[in-house]
Image (spheres, rainbow, N blue to C red):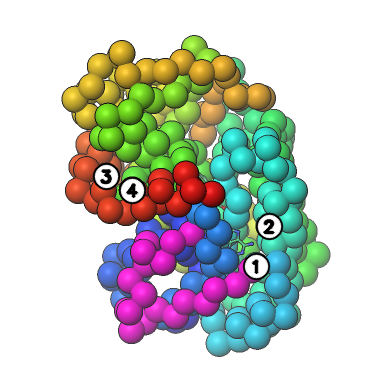
Amino acid sequence: MRILVTGGAGFIGSHYVRTLLAGGYPGYEDTRVTVLDKLTYAGHLSNLPTDHPRLDFVRGDICDLPLLLDLLPGHDAVVHFAAESHVDRSIEAAADFVRTNVGGTQSVLEACLRTGIERVVHVSTDEVYGSIAEGSWTETWPLEPNTPYAASKAGSDLVARSYVRTHGLDLSITRCSNNYGPYQHPEKLIPLFITNLLAGETVPLYGDGGNIREWLHVDDHCRAIHTVLTLGRAGEIYNIGGGNEQTNRQITDRLLELCGADASMIRWVADRKGHDLRYSIDESKIREELGYTPHISFEEGLRSTVAWYRDNPGWWKSIKHEQAAA
Ligand code: NAD
């Protein structure tokens, strides 16, 4: 088995690759992996075991169709993570999001089709559904994205659907809630707050801190993606949640405790434009149809994540340094 992973040097893609190469998915211990990644500001080779004998790394752009056509033959499956992923950046510079998330996804799927790839998973997000005041989204909920990031992911989901319906590509879509865990870029809420607190700096909390998100440990997300890759049906969408809703203020308070700080370290900042109030996923389909359940409780996951950042200052300090210099 040989799998091509796009965006495999980023947060979630690299977790998937490290787990796959470490034999974390039974029956796939011999899988060979090719990572295709542009190494934008969000991708780092330090996230990957680059000298692993079953890993090939290719630096390249998913919008580059000739490169994909050259690279894909010999692979059995593609797991497509590559994307511009930070909502705040999409508010400032939406064009990169449309280019990579919509155009790049189309190139990946076109290349999969032309080279006869047998199975594809397109990794998407719950943000495509917009915001929900009460109840939870099922997979049939209308797409009502509110930010350029979410809109570009919704666009990519529709392109993916069209490649199934028009061309019969064997592809499934996953839509997951917010992830956290090791190796997440320190621009995202949980690692930003942890690394600021570990460095003795304040944490910027949007609005009144009342926005609600559902959080899932990256290891559970990756196991769900692998489950969909191996057991999911073509043309189907699978929500991945975890049932763990928290306000940003609740997360902040827990992180302050875990880092030995108090509420005086909160810096209140003006709310994000178009800030969705609440996300909530109904994940009964993946549980009932594919037998997936999350394993890591939020408390255990958050504790181990704080410990990872505490134990790996070299990793996040160099990224923060790069970011400050950019
Ligand atoms: P990330 O920003 O950490 O990583 C993205 C990776 O894609 C980086 O390595 C980057 O270099 C690469 N990349 C970007 N543009 C590229 C291009 N044009 N060609 C090739 N590579 C390119 O993102 P992440 O948090 O790991 O998210 C991965 C996927 O999961 C995304 O599709 C995202 O929409 C989705 N997702 C993320 C979350 C979350 O909470 N982080 C939740 C649900 C779904």
Does the Cβ of the disc 1 residue fall within 8 Å of ligand 1? yes
Residue topped by disc 2: 100
Label 2 close to label 1 by CB (< 8 Å): yes
Task: Inspect this view and state whether residue 202 appears.
Answer: yes
In percent of width and height, residue 217 lies at 35, 43
Mark 3 vs mark 2, CA separation in Å:
29 Å
Residue topped by disc 3: 309
Q: Residue furthest right?
A: 166
Residue topped by disc 1: 62
Report the amino acid beneath label 1: Ile
Q: Nearer the viewer, mark 4 or mark 3?
A: 4
Q: Residue at x 70, y 72 (%)?
A: 64
Report the amino acid beneath label 4: Lys
Marked residue nearer the N-terminal end (4 or 1): 1
How would you rate the neighbour count of disc 1 (Cα within 10 Å): few for under 14, some for 14-19, many for 20 or more?
A: many
The residue range painted magenta reads 43-61
Mark 4 vs mark 3, CA separation in Å:
10 Å
Q: Is residue 242 left or right of residue 90?
A: left
Task: Inspect this view and state whether residue 221 appears.
Answer: no
* Residue 317, numbered circle: 4
In percent of width and height, residue 311 lies at 20, 48
Q: Is residue 182 left or right of residue 60?
A: left
**Element type where label 4 sits in the image:** helix
**Element type where label 3 sits in the image:** helix
How would you rate the neighbour count of disc 3 (Cα within 10 Å): few for under 14, some for 14-19, many for 20 or more?
A: many
Q: Nearer the viewer, residue 109 or 211?
A: 211
Label 3 close to label 2 by CB (< 8 Å): no
Mark 4 vs mark 2, CA separation in Å:
27 Å
Marked residue nearer the N-terminal end (3 or 1): 1
Magenta stretch encompasses residue 28: no
Mark 4 vs mark 1, CA separation in Å:
28 Å
